[in-house]
Each structure stands twice: as C-alpha cells, then as structure tokens.
Image: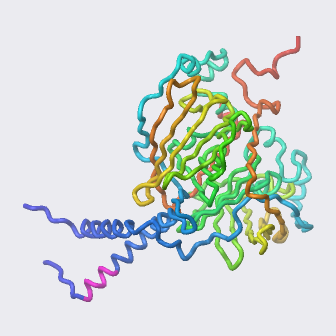
C-alpha cells in the first residue's frame, strides 16, 4: 500500500515551500518600515553634565547609600576584583560610551569593565523573569518615538545603583535618547522607579558630547592580582608568605 | 471520506497559509533583509550568530615550530599543576575576559553590530568586545598599545570584509591556537562574507606567528543566523570572589 502523506505533512510542505520562496527574496530589499534606529545616535560619547536632580530615597536606600565601599556608582571592591558592573555605571563612570545600531539592536559599550547593553528592537515578546537571567544591565527593548529612542529596561540583579543608592530586582528605567540637530550632543532623559529605593520616580537628564569618529577605543586592562586581590594556585599566594 | 473544498474555501485556506508562513518567516526575513544596508553597497554582518553543527574546516593542520610545541606544554608550578588537574586555569580563576579568535568560535552565540565603518563583535560570556575600524589603515604592531583582541582594521574586497588584527596582549588562557600564547608578532586575519542569502556568516581565519608557526594556519568557520525575535544575550558575570570557582 502506498503511504499517503498526512494533512499535517502537506501543511508542513506548503509552509516549507512558502518560507523558501519568501527567503529567496533578494537581500537588497529595502529596510523594514519599522526601522527603530535613531539617526545620529551612533558614535562615541562623553558624559558632560549630570544635571542637578536629587532622588527622594527611602530610609532603607538612604541607609544603604551611607555605607562605605563605593564611590558614586562605582563599587570599589568589584572594581578591584575586575568584576563587570552594570547600570547606571555603564552610562556614567565607565565611559566614554560607544553606541552602534543595527536593524535588530542598538548596543551601548563603555571602555571600563562594564557589561555591554543590548537594546533589542524585534523581540516577539519581552522575556519574563522565569526565562531571563537577571543581569546588571537588565533587559532593554527600544522603540523609536518621534525624534527619540525610548529604551525600557528591567530585570536587573541587585547591585549598586545611582550615586551609591542600591539597585534592586524591582528597578525599572525608561530612557529617552535624543540627539541635537547639529549632532554634537546627546541627551538622555531617564526615569527610574523602584519602590524599595525611590519614594517617587527619579527623573534626571544627562548630557553627552560627541567624540570625533576617528577615536580609538582604549582597552582597559584589569587584573585582580595586580590590584592586590585575585586567586592564586594552592601554596603560591604571595600575600600569605611571611617576610624573611 | 475525502473532504472537498469550495473554490473560495480553498482560496481562503491558501491565503491563511501564506499569512501564517509570513508570520513564521517574517522575523527571519527582516533580519536577512537587514543583511544589505541600503546606505552602502556592501553586505552588513549585523546579527546574532550561532556556530553551525560542523563549523570549522581546517585547510591544513597548524604547522607548529619546536618552540610552539614547548609553549603548548609549559612547565607548571606545583600549585598550577594541582589546579590544572582539576581543570582550573589562572584565567578562569581570575575571570580574565575572553578574546578572539577563541571567543568567536564557542557554542554560545556571538552578537555583531555592524554600523557603517564600525563593526563590533561580542561573545556573550565574559568577553572583551572586538572593535573593527573599517577603512582605517593598519598601523605598525609595535606602535599599538597591546590589547586582548588586538587593533583591528577592515577593508572591503568585493563583498568580503577583510579584518586584519595586530597588537595582541599576551595573557594566560585561551591563545591564538589552543593555549599557544600571543606574541607581539601574532597577526590574525578574517575574511567575512555572507552566504545562503544572508542566513550564514562565513569567515576564513588566517593566523600568522613566525615564532610558533612554520606557515600561516588557515581555517574556515561558519555561523548561522538566529532571529532577533526570539534571541537575546545571555550574560555571564564572572565573579572571581566566588569560592565555587576554585572548588574541586
């Protein structure tokens, strides 16, 4: 008996043919109409002004902030151990920053040891906490709104936040990136919410100035052992040797 | 009993199938369409890329010099030997960031953002980004401040982007080939191109190191595109303070 193809197989075959036909469209097709890239945003930027906004911290956040071990948003122990830090360090003390855009994402890098930020444009759905491992830079998605790129980020790990205040897993930030008409200035209007940290949403504006495109990114070399910490093979830690 | 469709029903079914197929294929198509940047005649390599099932094809095995064979099996201190017997290296113990070419060839996908004359390649776990300056002239390696991924410039040869890197810093850990240390004379060239209508990324790697290789080591490597609709970076924050890193 000749086996008959099932309806499901026929459907799969039809889908395969359609996908094949559609995927064979030339790669020179015009860019998608929903292109979220912001003209002028790509380049190197140096933080110039952090404004004067002051957050209204909760008592717990204020107490945490007053503890030693940090300088602004730099976690000093993490710095010595060369641990990559996240938000807001990436956009602040880790700079200058570099922003590059593709159709699928915008990436934000900092020269010091900071986790790269990926701002995704095409995620079919925002991953939930059970499938996304929280990170120091969270998960960012972006959308072009008029002359701005609006970036929404959450799913942060706990860590050091703005000006030494804590950052918790409840934190969320919405940033509005806008480039001046002459292309020389980038402003980011950010609003953080975190019920454990801020009594009210904390909004501020940071301004960056463009660095010429012939800039070369410096490699920041960090070695915990050179910083007087780090791990050594058993019996070979020079810090444990007694002076003769 | 065979089912029969009216003409309009069949038409509706076909239309639905096309719509369904469009939905399934659209995210991949959009990513592929972006493989050609309308602002330039050259291909665009942006995307999330995962190595294929058999990604590497050596044109010939590396021709190691005697010095290389010695460097591949360095004399370990007693403590290093203990660590090595448990699979621990100094680089892992201290969370040194990964670098090219090793970081580009792992099972975890890489992200590439190619934006005009700049291309950045990122390995998602504990990496130092690789910056490619397209259109810049290469400089004397001796005058470059050494870095993990070297100083990389790119030039177009037709639809191929030829990336040339010099000025590598030598650090413990993954080297240019296996654990071979980087030398000031190490040079890595990659010729990037797209295949299968933008669904595959290919690169021919050429590693030159006169002290360690009698002739350049050449191999091809292939990645497949992952759709942006369902993929995102999996960040690994390495913390050298974590005592589990040294447990055995």
Residue B163 shown in magenta: no
Please identify the quadrant where the N terminus of chain B is shown: bottom left
Q: Position of residue B219 (x, y in %)?
A: 46, 37
Q: Quadrant of residue B77?
A: top right
Q: Position of residue A218 (x, y in %)?
A: 75, 45
Between B219 and A228, the one nearer to me in the picture: B219
Q: Residue at x 57, y 63 (%)?
A: A127
Is any atom of residue B229 visible in this view?
A: no
Q: In the shown orientation, is residue A220 left or right of residue B80?
A: right
Principal secondary structure, stretch drawn in magenta: helix
Q: Is residue A116 above or below residue B220?
A: below
Q: Residue at x 87, y 48 (%)?
A: A70
Residue that sits furthest to the left in the current view:
A1
Please identify the quadrant where the C terminus of chain B is shown: top right
Q: Quadrant of residue B128?
A: top right
Is any atom of residue A101 visible in this view?
A: yes
Which stretch did the figure color magenta?
B8-15
Q: Quadrant of residue B149?
A: top right
Q: Residue at x 58, y 54 (%)?
A: B112
């Amino acid at each position: 008996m000749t086996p008959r193809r099932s309806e499901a197989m026929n459907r799969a075959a039809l889908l395969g043919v359609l996908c094949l036909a559609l995927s064979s469209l030339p790669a020179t097709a015009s860019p998608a109409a929903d292109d979220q890239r912001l003209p002028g945003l790509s380049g190197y930027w140096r933080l110039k002004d952090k404004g004067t906004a002051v957050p209204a911290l909760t008592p717990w956040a204020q107490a945490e902030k007053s503890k030693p071990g940090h300088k602004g948003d730099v976690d000093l122990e993490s710095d010595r151990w060369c641990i990559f830090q996240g938000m807001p360090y990436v956009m602040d003390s880790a700079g200058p920053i570099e922003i590059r855009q593709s159709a699928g994402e915008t990436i934000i890098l900092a020269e010091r040891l900071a986790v790269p930020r990926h701002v995704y444009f095409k995620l079919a759905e925002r991953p939930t906490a059970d499938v996304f491992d929280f990170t120091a830079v969270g998960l960012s998605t972006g959308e072009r709104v008029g002359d701005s790129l609006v970036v929404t980020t959450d799913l942060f790990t706990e860590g050091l936040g703005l000006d030494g205040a804590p950052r918790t897993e409840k934190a969320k930030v919405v940033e509005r990136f806008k480039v001046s008409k002459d292309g020389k200035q980038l402003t980011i209007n950010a609003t953080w919410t975190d019920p454990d940290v801020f009594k009210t949403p904390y909004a501020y504006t940071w301004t960056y100035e463009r660095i010429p495109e012939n800039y070369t990114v410096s490699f920041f070399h960090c070695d915990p052992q050179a910083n007087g910490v780090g791990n050594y093979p058993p019996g070979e830690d020079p810090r444990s040797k007694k002076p003769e | 009993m065979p089912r029969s469709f009216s003409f309009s029903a069949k038409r509706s079914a076909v239309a639905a199938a096309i719509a369904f197929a469009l939905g399934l294929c659209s995210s991949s198509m959009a990513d592929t369409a972006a493989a050609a940047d309308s602002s330039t005649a050259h291909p665009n390599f942006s995307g999330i890329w995962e190595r294929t099932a058999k990604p590497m094809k050596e044109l010939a095995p590396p021709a190691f010099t005697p010095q290389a064979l010695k460097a591949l099996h360095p004399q370990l201190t007693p403590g290093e030997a203990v660590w090595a017997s448990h699979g621990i290296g100094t680089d892992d113990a201290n969370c040194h960031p990964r670098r090219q070419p090793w970081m580009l060839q792992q099972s975890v996908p890489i992200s590439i953002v190619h934006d005009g004359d700049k291309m950045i390649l990122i390995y998602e776990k504990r990496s130092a980004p690789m910056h490619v300056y397209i259109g810049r002239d290469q400089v004397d390696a001796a005058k470059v401040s050494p870095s993990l991924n070297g100083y990389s410039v790119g030039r177009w040869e037709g639809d191929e982007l030829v990336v040339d890197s010099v000025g590598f810093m030598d650090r413990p850990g993954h080297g240019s080939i296996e654990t071979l240390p980087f030398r000031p004379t190490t040079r890595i060239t990659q010729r990037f191109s797209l295949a299968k209508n933008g669904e595959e990324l290919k690169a021919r790697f050429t590693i030159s190191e006169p002290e360690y290789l009698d002739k350049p080591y050449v191999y091809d490597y292939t990645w497949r595109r992952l759709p942006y609709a369902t993929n995102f970076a999996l960040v690994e924050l390495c913390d050298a303070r974590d005592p589990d890193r040294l447990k055995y």
